[in-house]
Amino acid sequence: MAISLSPSTWNSLGLGVAATWAALGLAGGLRPAAAADLFGITALGSGGRGDGKSGADRDSMIGFAGVLGSRDMTIALTLLYLGRAGRNADMGAVILSTMTITAVDIWLVWRKKKGFNSELGVLTVGSLIWAVIGFGLRGHSD
């Protein structure tokens, strides 16, 4: 069954994907410990800094969250630019190319959590929805 929506509706859905990437980027930047923990990077215990056994130090966690946040914001801004320019097919290509990023993110969370959980469910379902939107923007839904 094909999903028949107008180009402006697909564009709005693509801008919704952009907003979600922006929200993820901001969340990672504002809560670096939570972002790092989601991917299995844990803070040091009382053992001190740099012993190599206790996990990541605070600077590493903030650095990881900064890289994650800047990645997500870059994708969001790219999608925003393409959406505002009405370049739906290009917007769809960017969204579909981010499926490699989301696949790795899902794998990292799955590996850390040792199985299926609500965080993994949200990431998986969200990625599938994004893929449908990406294909729709590319014109593969008709």
Image (cartoon, helix red, strand yellow):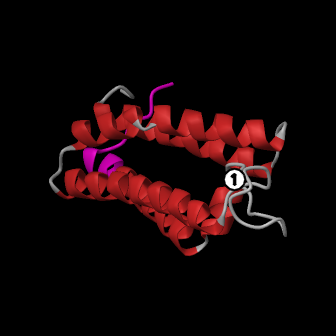
The residue under the point 55% across, 65% down is: 28
Q: Quadrant of the C terminus?
A: top left
- Vertical side of 23 occupied by 71: above or below: above
In the foreground, 112 or 138: 112
- Vertical side of 135 occupied by 85: above or below: below
In the foreground, 138 or 40: 40
Q: Quadrant of residue 16?
A: bottom left
Q: Is residue 40 magenta?
A: no
Q: Which residue is mark 1?
A: 41
| Residue placed furthest toward the front | 51
- Check disc 1 and give the amino acid type: Ile
From the viewer's perspective, is 58 left or right of 136? right
Residue 128 seen in the current view: no
Relative image position of residue 99 (x, y in whole percent): 48, 34
Relative image position of residue 130 (x, y in whole percent): 48, 42
Relative image position of residue 46 (x, y in whole percent): 84, 70
Residue 27 seen in the current view: yes
| Residue placed furthest toward the left | 85
| Range shown magenta | 1-12
In the foreground, 121 or 142: 121
Secondary element type, mark 1: loop
The residue under the point 68% across, 59% down is: 50
Crowd class of label 1 (few under 14; some 14 to 19; many from 20; radius 10 Å): some
